[in-house]
Image (cartoon, rainbow, N blue to C red):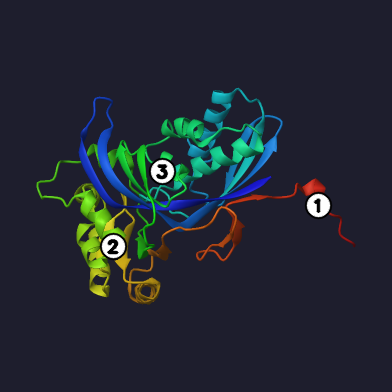
């Protein structure tokens, strides 16, 4: 049995360059992996794939990316083993944070180890690319990358300083397909991704704040007007820069430091709409060996942890 964490992502920068012949959109984006994470527990079975989840609103059927990833691994390798997977869901669903994609990658990595397949990351990346546009990003060891193509062609970025944000997620959900489908090219000039990366590398938060960009924001706001209210609230409370992540509706506010994020989060919880979910988030920098304690749940888990099977547990006295 294995336990793995599946971190979320932000898009600090997202340009939509046009629709491709295959129906997808060509994009240029800057990914940041953050420390808000789901947790998956995987147990090998002789056959069959089953999924359970702590979020009753999330489908545990064949449309879930966790089961899609498991089946893709079976079909690619010909393995006949099965598994039961339990998902502890902490990343908001359909919010532009990549939770489903990250869960898919943790499934691929976990079953690769659990079933003893020995696939390297290049093989896993080829499988991941067919599951979703931002799935390959979560296979990288670095928390930063530039994504191109559909988002699946990732250029890792190293030695960048961590950031702190306040994240606000309303109750509404948005369909990525529908937001992209309604997208119209913007007329406003956008900053270059090179400028954004340069500001990030130099630790220039003011310059970084002015470079945050998301072409999908107008269409997302049209479909979910509360986004603009969240952005106005974050601006009034003193965030350096505010943007939608992905296709939304999650909105993040760039902060000067973790203390600044904590201060703003406390004010938001006191004065903002009660149904808005508010989180303090930071760039995800766990080591592969070190244990990690989720600031959102208080639970301690490792990136990959082998758990004893119930029948192997030592008996307790009665």
Residue drawn at 40 percent across, 36 percent down: 132
Sequence-wise first label, 2 or 1: 2
> Which label was assigned to residue 313?
1
Residue drawn at 32 percent across, 61 percent down: 252
Residue 97: % across, % down? 39, 51
Question: What is the C-alpha distance between the residues marked 2 and 3?
Answer: 23 Å
Residue 100: % across, % down? 45, 44
* Tag 3 residue: 137
Sequence-wise first label, 2 or 3: 3
Question: Element type at marker 2?
Answer: helix
Q: Nearer the viewer, mark 2 or mark 1?
A: 2
Asked whether the residues under the numbered discs 1 and 3 touch, taking CB atoms below 8 Å apart as contact, a structural biologist would say no
Label 1 packing within 10 angstroms: few (<14), some (14-19), many (20+) = few
Q: Is residue 84 left or right of residue 199?
A: right
Question: What is the C-alpha distance between the residues marked 1 and 3?
Answer: 37 Å
Question: Element type at marker 1?
Answer: loop
Label 2 packing within 10 angstroms: few (<14), some (14-19), many (20+) = few
Q: Nearer the viewer, mark 1 or mark 3?
A: 3
Q: Quadrant of residue 175?
A: top left
* Tag 2 residue: 202
Residue situated furthest right in the rendering: 318
Out of 22 and 290, give the one closest to the viewer.
290
Q: Quadrant of residue 233?
A: bottom left
């Amino acid at each position: 049995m294995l336990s793995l964490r599946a971190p979320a992502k932000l898009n600090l920068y997202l340009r939509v360059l046009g629709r491709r012949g295959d129906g997808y959109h060509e994009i240029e984006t800057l990914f940041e992996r953050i420390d808000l994470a789901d947790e998956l527990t995987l147990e090998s079975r002789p056959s069959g794939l089953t999924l359970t989840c702590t979020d009753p609103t999330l489908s545990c059927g064949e449309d879930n990316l966790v089961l899609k990833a498991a089946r893709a691994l079976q079909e690619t390798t010909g393995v006949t083993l099965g598994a039961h997977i339990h998902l502890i869901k902490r990343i908001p669903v359909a919010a532009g944070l990549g939770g489903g994609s990250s869960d898919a990658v943790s499934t691929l990595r976990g079953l690769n180890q659990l079933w003893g397949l020995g696939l390297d990351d290049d093989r896993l990346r080829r499988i991941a690319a067919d599951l979703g546009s931002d799935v390959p990003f979560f296979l990288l060891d670095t928390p930063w990358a530039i994504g191109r193509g559909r988002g699946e062609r990732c250029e890792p970025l190293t030695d960048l300083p961590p950031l702190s944000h306040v994240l606000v997620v309303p109750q509404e959900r948005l369909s990525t397909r529908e937001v992209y489908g309604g997208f119209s090219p913007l007329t406003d000039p956008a900053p270059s991704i090179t400028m954004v990366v340069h500001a990030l590398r130099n630790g220039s938060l003011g310059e970084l704040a002015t470079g945050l960009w998301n072409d999908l924001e107008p269409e997302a706001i049209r479909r979910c007007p509360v986004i603009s209210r969240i952005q106005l609230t974050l601006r009034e409370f003193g965030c350096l820069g505010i943007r939608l992540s992905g296709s939304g509706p999650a909105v993040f506010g760039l902060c000067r430091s973790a203390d600044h994020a904590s201060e703003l989060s406390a004010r938001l919880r006191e004065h903002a709409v009660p149904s808005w979910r508010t989180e303090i988030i930071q760039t995800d920098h766990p080591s592969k060996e070190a244990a990690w304690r989720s600031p959102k749940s208080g639970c301690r888990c490792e990136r990959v942890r082998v758990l004893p099977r119930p029948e192997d547990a030592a008996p307790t006295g009665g």
